[in-house]
Amino acid sequence: MIALVPLAQVDPQAVETLLDHAFGAERRARTAYRIRTGTEAIPELSFAAIAADGSLAGTIQCWPVLIACDSGDSRPLVMVGPVAVEPELQQSGIGRALMDRMLEAVPEGDSLMLIGDPEYYGRFFGFTADRTGAWRLPGPFEARRLLAKGPNVPDCAGELGPRILQPA
């Protein structure tokens, strides 16, 4: 039995340890980390999966980013990921449950993006690369894995980067 809770309820060091187990310590050099540099995860969209024994089984984090279109327009997006599951628990539905919970919490009208497997994220969650082909990222990536979904995903050429949220 897995319980989904807000990520803020989990020790940050436990999250870092899980991410190292799932992706390796070199994960911080990935392009996804560069895109969200200087931002903090969005608490309302970030969750943890807690196993029956109280251990951390998985996490999902979402980040505020934006696409700065070459036309001068910019659009806010929510970057989904990482979605991490302890390696011995992968393929047990935890990642899918975390995605479903996050998608339930997304405010109407928000657009999402991620870097991931289009066969999985497209089939189960409706993400596509249809409007991301001219986006530039601050590091290497496979264009087919740059996916988005939502009513306001721009179809423009532009640079994807962090969106620094101002305190209310």
Image (cartoon, helix red, strand yellow):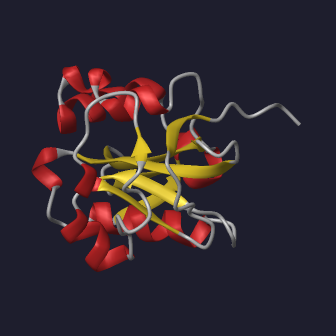
Question: Which residue is at the far right?
Answer: 168
Q: What quarter of the picture does the C terminus occupy? A: top right
- Residue drawn at 66 percent across, 49 percent down: 76
- Point 24% across, 65% down: residue: 118
Q: Residue furthest front?
A: 71
- Residue 162 in the image: x percent, y percent? 57, 32
Q: Can residue 128 be seen in this snapshot?
A: yes
Query: Which of the 4 quarters of the picture holds residue 140?
Result: top left
Residue sitting nearer the eye, 65 or 102? 65
Question: Does 123 sit above or below residue 132?
Answer: below
Q: Tell me what residue is drawn at x 49 percent, y 38 percent.
A: 10
**Residue farthest to the left?**
88
- Quadrant where the N terminus lies? bottom left
Residue 131 percent location from the top left of the image: 44, 64
| Residue 123, x across and y down, in percent | 27, 78
Figure check: 13 above or below 43: above
As drawn, 21 above or below 97: above
Tally of numbered tags: 0
Q: Is residue 71 left or right of residue 155?
A: right
In the image, is 30 to the left or to the right of 68?
Answer: left
Does residue 49 show up?
no
Q: Residue at x 50, y 32 (%)?
A: 36
Please state which of residues 23 and 21 is positioned toward the viewer in this rendering.
23
Q: Quadrant of residue 98?
A: bottom left
Asked if residue 70 lies left or right of residue 148, the reply is right
Q: Position of residue 74 (x, y in %)?
A: 68, 46
